[in-house]
Every structure is written in C-alpha cells, then in structure tokens.
Image: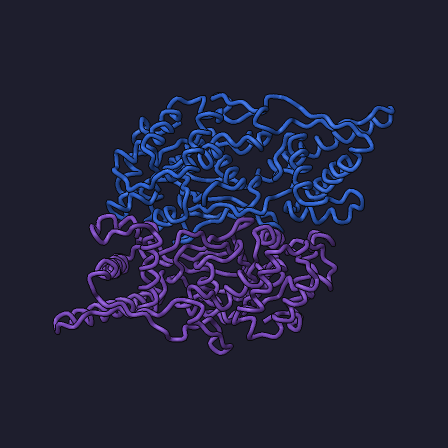
Chain colours: A blue, B purple
Amino acid sequence: MADNDNNKIDIDVLKKMDGLASDMLSDIESLKTPVLKTPLRSLQNVSFNEKEGFFALKGKFKKRTLTASTARSFAQTLKMISLSKGLINTDDLATKREVYYTAYNWLDAKFKNQPESDNVMDDIEAMLGVNREQLGFIPEEKGGAVAGKLTVIDRDPDTKEPLRIDCSKMGSGAYSIPISVEHLRFETDAKFVLAIETGGAFQRLVKHKYWQIANCILISMGGVPTRATRRFIRRLSDDKSLPVYVFTDGDFYGYMNIYRTLKVGSGNAAHINQFFCVPNAHFIGVTPRDIIDYKLPTHSLKEVDVKRGKDALKNDPYVHFYKQWQDAIKLQLELGKRAEQQAFAKCDLNYVMTHYLPEKIADKSKWLP
Amino acid sequence: MADNDNNKIDIDVLKKMDGLASDMLSDIESLKTPVLKTPLRSLQNVSFNEKEGFFALKGKFKKRTLTASTARSFAQTLKMISLSKGLINTDDLATKREVYYTAYNWLDAKFKNQPESDNVMDDIEAMLGVNREQLGFIPEEKGGAVAGKLTVIDRDPDTKEPLRIDCSKMGSGAYSIPISVEHLRFETDAKFVLAIETGGAFQRLVKHKYWQIANCILISMGGVPTRATRRFIRRLSDDKSLPVYVFTDGDFYGYMNIYRTLKVGSGNAAHINQFFCVPNAHFIGVTPRDIIDYKLPTHSLKEVDVKRGKDALKNDPYVHFYKQWQDAIKLQLELGKRAEQQAFAKCDLNYVMTHYLPEKIADKSKWLP
C-alpha cells in the first residue's frame, strides 16, 4: 500500500518532468524559443480564504525565455531536474547542500553559491507543483519529536519490509521525525494531536504520560516547526481525521511564526503551502485572555514584539480574515505583556497538565481560529 | 538494576543536601555565621591533562557569609535546594524556566530574572558536585537523535516496567534522546559510536543503513551537542567501552565548539565537565589535511573564523596540550579555507559512505586527538 502510494507520487512527478522536457524539445525542434514558466513567489501573489485553508497562489507567473543571458540558469534548471529524476529512480535523497556540491562538476552551470542553487530548486518545486521532498531534495533541518498513542509504519530501506514504530513505547524519549515523511503510514486510536512549542513543556507531558490520560499524540515542534514536522502533522491529521491542538507561548512569535505558519503556511514559500498547511489546527493557548484568566506571570513586550503585533494587524492576510485574532492581538498590545507556556508552573509544576490543558481543550469557545 | 543505580545517585545527592543543611543548622545553633562555599566558575580556575581527560577545576572557591546583603541569595539557595529535594523524592523534573516561575511564590526570595535563578542553580550544582539533571533540573534544549545497533532500556514512568527501545527498528526516523538520561541502560554489539554534526549527513547514513554496514551507532548532534546528548554519549561510551568517532564540518566551529566541548567540556561550566566529557572521543574529520587529500570544495575563512582559530591557538588549554591540533589549526589558517561534511558529494552523493568514512576510520594516523 505505502509503496504503491509512493510509486504513484513518484510516477506523477516523473511524468511532469518528462512533459516539461518534451515540450521544450518540441519547441527546439520546431525552431521556437523554449520558455520556463514559474509561479511568482511573493506575498503579493497569495490570498487566504477559509475553504482552501492556506495561503494560496493568485496565479501570477514569471516567464524565462532561453537567451544568451538566461542560458546558464536554463541549464542549471534542466540539470537539477535530471538530478532529481536520478534520485527518484534510485530511491535516494540529497540535501540542499549536497545538491549545491554535486553541481561542482557541472562546468559552466556550476552555482556561485547555495542561495543560487536553492532558488533554482524553489523554482522547480513551483514549476512542477510538487514539494521539494517529492523531488528527493531534503532540507538540513532536524524534525520534531513524537510520543504517545501512535504507531508509525515505515519500511526497511533494504528489504522494504514494513517497520512498526510504537510511539507509546519510547519511555522518557521520543520518536524523532525523519527529514522526509512522504512514505510513512499511521495507526492510532488517539482523539487529537497536541503540538507543543518547547522541548521543556513536551518533556513534562511525556514524563507524566499525559498522552495516556488525554488519549492523544504529543508532538514537540521545538520552535517554528521544520518542513518535515509540518508535513508529518498534516499527513497524520489528514489520514486519521485528527484535530491538531497547538500550544505555544503567549506571544506574537507563538501566534504568527509558529501557529499561523503551521496552519496556513508562509508568504515566501506559498507554492508549497498546499502540502504543508494543517487546516485542522486550532490554537488553544497561551492566549492573551489566559494571561488575565490565569493571572500568569508575564514579561513586558519589547519594541520588537510590539512591531511584530502591529505588522500582523496591518499586513497578515490571515489576521485580516479573523476578527478573533485581531481582537486577541489588540488585547495583547493593550496589556503590553507576554506569557510563556511554562508560566503555569507558578501555581504548581503539574498545573498545566492537571488543570489548564483539560479545561482549555474542553472549552472550544476559548480557542482562537 | 537501573532503579537501584538511580536510587543510589538520588540517595547520594540527598545526603549531600542534608549534610549542607545540618552544617548550616549547627553553625546557627552555636551562634556562628553560616557560610556557603562554591567553586569559582571561570577559565582561570580550570586546567587540562590527558589523564583526567576534561577541563578540571583547579580548586579556587568563593565563600558567601550570611549578612544583611546576602540574606536574599542565601534564602534562594536554600529554597532551591529544598525544591530539588522535593523533585527527587517525587521522581519529578523541572525545567530551568519552570524553576524560575515556581519562585514567583517565594515572596522576597523571588528572582528578578531567569539569569539570577540559573546562577543560583549553577552554584548549587558546583557546591554539591553533582550535575543539574541529578538535582531534577533539566534544560529546555532538545536532545540528539540516534539510529543503529543499540537498544536503549528505559522504564515506564507509571509501572516502572523496563521498556526496550530498538534503535535499529526506526526506519528512516530515529530515537530522540530525552532531556534527562541518567536512568537509561544500554545493550549493543556495535563496535563504535559515530557522532555527526549535521542532520543532513545523519539522514544520508540512516537512509542507507550505514550503521549495519559499519556495525555502529549513529548519533546526530545537530550542531553543538546539548547537555543531554553529551551525557548520553558519555554514559553509552562508558557502559559499553565504545570509542566515539566525531565527524563535523572542517572548520574551527566544528573542531572547538563541537568536538572539544564534547570531549573535554567548556570553560564556563567547568564544574560539570567531569559528567559530560567523553574521554573516548576521537576526531576523524573533516580535518584540514582532508581538504587537501580529497580536493574538497571549500569556502574562504571569514574574519570571524580566522579570529576563532587564532584564539584557539592562544587561549585554549586543550590546543596547548596537543601539538597535532596546533599544527592542524595552523595548516587551516594557511589554507585560508574551510570545508563541510557534505562537500564529499562533489565526487558522488554516497562517496562519504562508500569511501571517506571507511578509509578514515581504518587509519588512526589521520585522526586528531
């Protein structure tokens, strides 16, 4: 099953590559100038609506025609597509950094620096409408950690035999999400996923087996979730129809950089948001209202925090869409304070587990969209 | 067994606390002024020799006598020791951040900010000669990831039943090291541990099951290893008498910040180096000599890199001790270049696995101490 699914994705990607290459070939054979067409990647070319559930491309394109001055980037694009084809056919992976080094042997098509190489990769991703991982290209970043009521089904790289990884049997440790997650399958009878900002808060919940008490899956994001972590949560949520409750610090970084990126994606990588967004994510806390309701210890907002909040009100299509978020951000700016996940330790070290999370999860009216 | 070992550590720590408290009590009862004595924590108070194998304290102390002006920090120290005692007795943990918040209820002994709280914690650690994790205090940081020929034996937090975690059965994922590792035991027939700087290089070796080919345990450090990762590698290396081969980028950050910290510790936390150093660590690459021998793609050293190299030659007791390191650093400064782990992708994506690592591990004469 998993292998069939993967083969299908791989075959689709290979077909798209072949289509692009044969279009170009027939252009050349009929003496037309070949053109590469890529969606414009910028905030000006994205929109948000609730039905789609992610920052979607509006449909502006940039076209690059083969000329003397574009010959080099044309060659790089085609060489990189060919490298990706080789990776898919041999079931191998290459990091962005490795791709850059591989091109050392491409003579005039060698990259000047990694940003140049990454940019070509992003263009190919957007051009083919697939995500980088489906091309066999993986980021350097480390994935998140998982504990609780979930069995991940992977496969042995050699024998392709299925491997069952029971995330409830990791003791005080956890399952570390691999950099590419496309081939994973899931088994679970959990009721929800709890995605947690900090390793410290995650460790407390693991230590006390909160996942057993609450019948859930715990995922540590370790700050802004990596692509692999976002994709893992998305696939898990889709496959098992699980809601994802997000628990971050009560600050604009937690609301926007972590939660909003997880839920709808970001502006500068809009062409991949459809694969990485988690439409079924809900923000349970720490909300500005929690700071008041739970009398949490706080820190004053710094200038940079205030700027981040004002920016969100002014420029963020997601915030524009939801009055609740506008109200929440305004309340926080009025309070002039922020509070952390771990601030509940003021009451009692385990208060977060015995009171806050159960109360919050039970009362939808106190979540943010 | 593990429980007995842990109980023994816990009992030792509790004894030290009781000793400190009863000394203070008898001082007070005999109308003497109580004193807290802490080892001086700075580079001026550390030395290196090969036999000890870590940056060791030279034996300078600071003494704090109870006066009107020290009353607050005295109270904080005693309250925090009492908190630690509670954690040990209830088998619980608290992050540094949670400790800071817990003290919100300590009235006049409340901390002004977390650095103040962390500083008291460091003092207690040094005073009692234990590591923070043994006090039940854990850092926020995320641990590293492990794959390969290792079974970690943890225990169920509720039932205390042993839990066996087979790191060879994680597929493309890995076992994520918990924040506290004191209670873990290990089973392995691997010949060595390979500690790797980047997640990308780790993922390639996992994908191709290099651990099976080389009969080893792979650990991803993700940059400078966290305390948990250092302690995990140390305990594993000690318990199973395994050598640890360290594979980082070929730059001063890899040599000093990552490798030297893993092997002998750092200057500003010298009181805990004895628990975290890995005496059996060896640096296999990327060495400055590799840059020449393998004709690696390089980047020019920046000013900050050059400064880091010169600083190491001038100030680092570890570099002072080993002529090989002095020569290596001088060579790199002459080359004016640095090279990354992934630079081997120039030859072939899997060259690092098929040629570089096997050749390097087989030839001790090319390692650095």
| Camera sees residue A198 | yes
Horizontal side, residue B38 vs residue B282: left or right = left
Horizontal side, residue B135 vs residue B365: left or right = left
Horizontal side, residue B245 vs residue B4: left or right = right
Q: Which residue lies most toward the bottom here?
A: B51
- Which residue is at 46% across, 47% downward? A145
Estimate the x, y position of residue A284 in percent, counting from the top left.
36, 33
- Which residue is at 84% across, 24% downward? A32
- Which residue is at 34% across, 72% downward? B61
User: Which quadrant holds residue A292?
Assistant: top left
* Residue A362 position (above or below residue B68): above
Horizontal side, residue A57 vs residue A354: left or right = right
Quarter of the figure that contains the N terminus of chain A: top right
Estimate the x, y position of residue B179 in percent, counting from the top left.
40, 55
Q: Which residue lies most toward the front here?
A: B69
* Residue A368 position (above or below residue A199): above
Quarter of the figure that contains the C terminus of chain A: top left
Estimate the x, y position of residue A64 in percent, counting from the top left.
74, 28
Estimate the x, y position of residue B369 in percent, counting from the top left.
58, 71
* Residue B75 position (above or below residue A232): below
How many marks on residues?
A: 0
User: Which quadrant holds residue A115?
Assistant: top right
User: Which quadrant holds residue A24?
Assistant: top right
| Camera sees residue B168 | no
- Which residue is at 43% across, 52% downward? B141
